[in-house]
Image (cartoon, rainbow, N blue to C red):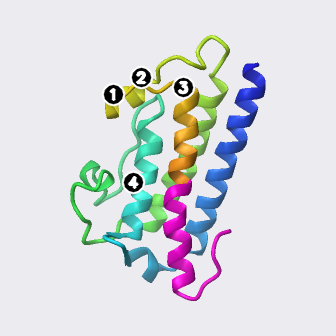
């Protein structure tokens, strides 16, 4: 059973990494720095990246210059964009970390509490649910990214 589940979870990981990587590759610099709603695009992406990192076991990534935890959780509004190149590099490094987590799931630990999520948010999510939430969270913010591209007259991601 875990094989079927982890195969499905891996497809979800491939899915959200694929579309967000595509966004990074097509997002022009002026849009990266633009504010959509109340927050800059780059800050939304930093938030998605930071959450992905903190919900998975292993040492936390080294944040690029100007990227803070406070920015990631929207406690403050960023006034200077974090380098898109640095974020793109870190995003690429997240996929192997995410894949390793998915591959570590078995029948015995699939429904166990994800201690990383518990430590960050103080809530009880299973390992499998946390991967599902990373997927849905990425797509939630992808809607903002897609709309911003279209508002600029560029093709969307979908």
**Tag 3 or tag 2, which sits nearer the N-term?**
2
- Please tell me which residue is depicted at 36% across the width and 73% down the height of the picture: 37
CA gap between label 4 and label 3 equals 20 Å
* The magenta segment: 139-158
Residue lying at the far left in this picture: please name it: 76
Q: Where, by quadrant of the figure, is residue 55 drawn?
A: top left
Identify the residue under disc 3.
127
Figure quadrant of the N terminus: top right
Crowd band around label 2 with a 10 angstrom C-alpha radius: few (<14), some (14–19), many (20+): some
Q: Where, by quadrant of the figure, is residue 43 drawn?
A: bottom left
Identify the residue under disc 2.
115
**Tag 4 or tag 2, which sits nearer the N-term?**
4
**Circle 4 SS class:** helix
- Please tell me which residue is depicted at 48% across the width and 33% down the height of the picture: 56
Identify the residue under disc 4.
47
Residue 91 location (% of width, % of height): 52, 53
Identify the residue under disc 1.
119
CA gap between label 2 and label 3 equals 9 Å
Q: Is residue 7 above or below residue 37?
A: above
- Residue 155 within the magenta-colored segment of the rendering: yes
Crowd band around label 3 with a 10 angstrom C-alpha radius: few (<14), some (14–19), many (20+): many
**Tag 4 or tag 1, which sits nearer the N-term?**
4
Count the marks.
4
- Please tell me which residue is depicted at 47% across the width and 28% down the height of the picture: 57
Q: Are marks 1 and 2 in contact (CB under 8 Å)?
A: yes
């Amino acid at each position: 059973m875990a094989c079927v589940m982890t195969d499905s979870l891996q497809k979800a990981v491939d899915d959200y990494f694929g579309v967000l990587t595509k966004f990074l590759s097509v997002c022009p610099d002026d849009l990266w720095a633009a504010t959509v709603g109340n927050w800059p695009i780059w800050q939304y992406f930093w938030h998605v990246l930071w959450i992905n990192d903190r919900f998975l076991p292993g040492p936390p990534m080294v944040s690029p210059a100007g990227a803070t935890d406070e920015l990631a959780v929207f406690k403050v509004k960023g006034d200077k964009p974090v380098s898109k190149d640095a974020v793109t590099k870190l995003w690429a490094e997240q996929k192997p970390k995410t894949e390793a987590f998915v591959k570590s799931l078995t029948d015995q630990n699939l429904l166990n509490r994800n201690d990383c999520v518990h430590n960050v948010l103080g809530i009880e999510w299973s390992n499998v649910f946390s991967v599902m939430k990373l997927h849905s969270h990425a797509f939630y913010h992808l809607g903002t990214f897609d709309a911003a591209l279209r508002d600029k007259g560029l093709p969307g991601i979908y």
